[in-house]
Amino acid sequence: MYEISIVTPVSQQDEKYIKRCYETVKGQLQANVEWIVILEGDSPLAEQVQLENKENPNVDIKVVVDTELKNVNEKRNKGIEVATGEYLYFLDVDDFLHEHTLYVLLESAKSNSDSYDVILGAIKETNVSVHLPSSYSRMLKRLLDNRIAKPKTLAVKKYRASALNTLFKREFIVEHGIYFDENVLGFSDILFTSQAYTKTTKAVVYDKDAIYLKLIRNDPINDPSIAQALNGIEWYPQSMAQAIASLEDGHPFKNVLLKRFLKAYHYKYLNGIYNEDPDDVYKGIWSDAFKQIGLDQFSFSRSIHQKEIQLLCEGHYKKAARMANRRLNFRMLKKIKKKPGSYRRVLYQKWFTKKMAIKKDYILYESFLGRNYSDSPKYIYEYLNRTYPGKYKHIWVFNNPDREEPKGVVKVKRFGLKHLYFMARAKFHVNNMRQPKWFVKRPGQVFLATWHGTPLKKLVFDMNEVHSANPNYKKDFYLQSRAWDYLVSANHYSTEIFKRAFMFDNEILEHGYPRNDLLYAENKEQIADQLKAKLQLPKDKKNCPLCAYLA
């Protein structure tokens, strides 16, 4: 019998991760392991790793192909069914393990004479493919510090919902009929783990040295993980309600889940339930969840909270929303008190964009995040000001609005109150970078994105991995660029890349960058002479490409 059965469900779109996942499994210090890969159809990559692994005495690969298995829970249950190992371990195909992880978990599992049923390790997140360091130093320290593994007994309040990086004794799981609910698509792990936690008669233990790296995919638009693709506000209440209702009253873990559920409602999902649900779909789901659990199960800190949820359950959505929004507004005021500068954004989103009319003759310009007066926004402004004098009110955004140029315009400090006021009221926006994530595109506003260069490097969705301080770079860029009505392109080469790399479907203006118009101006020779004089260059010097960009 194998010591550990690793179960990895794989969807068709995730088969590209099989080879990398194999490297993670093959690199484990723990021997006598079977890796069960559950597929929806034949996979050349799975066949390839099977052949490659033929001479490996430590890992046996079983590939299960079943076209009837469509969701991750069906595949995991199939894995439980075909597994023969003493312990079960669930590994997502795109994640990583330190080479000592399984060894450490099994060592902890057997540190008790009767062996534990549920052993958890640590889960950390990463947004890039990683090269994991050798386990030598960690294992040596573990040996020197404690020659016999002594895992920590986990407090009930620290039991986690995820089934990942956890060893489950297979005999215990099968004996108690613990399986994944195949009808629940999101947050389904809690239905499995809650049963395991509450049915074991032994301690649930934790070993911090067993490290699992959960990949947070950097392209949730084209290549989302299951968690990224699902809508938490919809699935969380359904799975949690089912898990809570299945547990016996008074069990410590049931009380923990009740607190978590109430906290998620009050903080994480409250705004979405009442302000992002015009068709009352989410309100109905949360109402049903509360009713399934039973309001008498909860310990409300304030009677007004209980009243709000009672109204939700009775279908009085407007009354419940009024109460919820009073709490949201109070939190907002507390935030403003703590961070006084945040009041500007609150005014922008709650007042300026909702109460003030758009001014059809206002144009708001910004170049390179307000750092200077330059690039295509500069030349668009100068053309409009020259061609249509007095027709438009021009507003420029600067980090330092006390600058001299441009003259005759309104200059506002970036993210100052005036900037946000004009951001809400200006009909036209001209920007060569991305706007803030909290920008509200109002109906009737027109956004012209001029961009700022020729894409000689890979951009956004052309990048395989994003080594950026912001792991949500691709998602943020995608959402921000949905506000662009027009995108300026310098040439056909750029146009094709913008369409693909930005996933941009609105109109692309392939007319060249306005900043380059002076290269074709009728008085370009005069402009060049003026620049040469300014730079103290010989008047007869012919090759001065820099001059054109210093105007």
Image: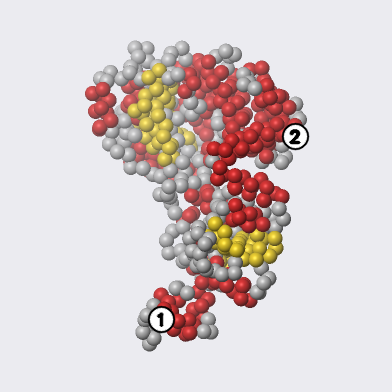
Percent x, y of residue 233? 61, 35
- Residue 415: percent from left, percent from top: 55, 53
Identify the residue shown where x is 70% and y is 27%: 308
Whichever of callouts 1 and 2 sits on the residue coming sooner in the sequence is 2
Residue at the spot 68% in from the left edge and 21% down from the top edge: 303
Task: Give the crowd class for mark 2: few <14, some 14-19, many >=20 residues within 10 Å.
Answer: few
Question: Viewed as shown, does residue 327 lie left or right of 144?
Answer: right
State the SS at label 1: helix
For disc 2, the marked residue is: 318
Q: What type is the residue that disc 1 sits on?
A: Lys
Query: For this view, does 325 lie left or right of residue 170?
Result: right
- The residue indicated by pointer 1 is 532
Give the residue drawn at x 42%, y 49%: 468
Q: Amino acid at mark 2?
A: Lys
CA neighbours of label 1 inside 10 A, class few (<14), some (14 to 19), many (20+): some
The quadrant in which residue 316 appears is top right
Q: Is residue 379 in sight in this rendering?
A: yes
Q: Quadrant of residue 104?
A: top left
* Front-lying residue, 372 or 126: 372
Q: Residue at x 25, y 32 (%)?
A: 137
Q: How many marks?
A: 2
Look at the image and tell me in which quarter the N terminus lies: top left
Q: Is residue 62 visible?
A: no
The label nearer to you, 1 versus 2, is 1
Quarter residue 30 falls in:
top left
Q: Is residue 343 left or right of residue 99?
A: right
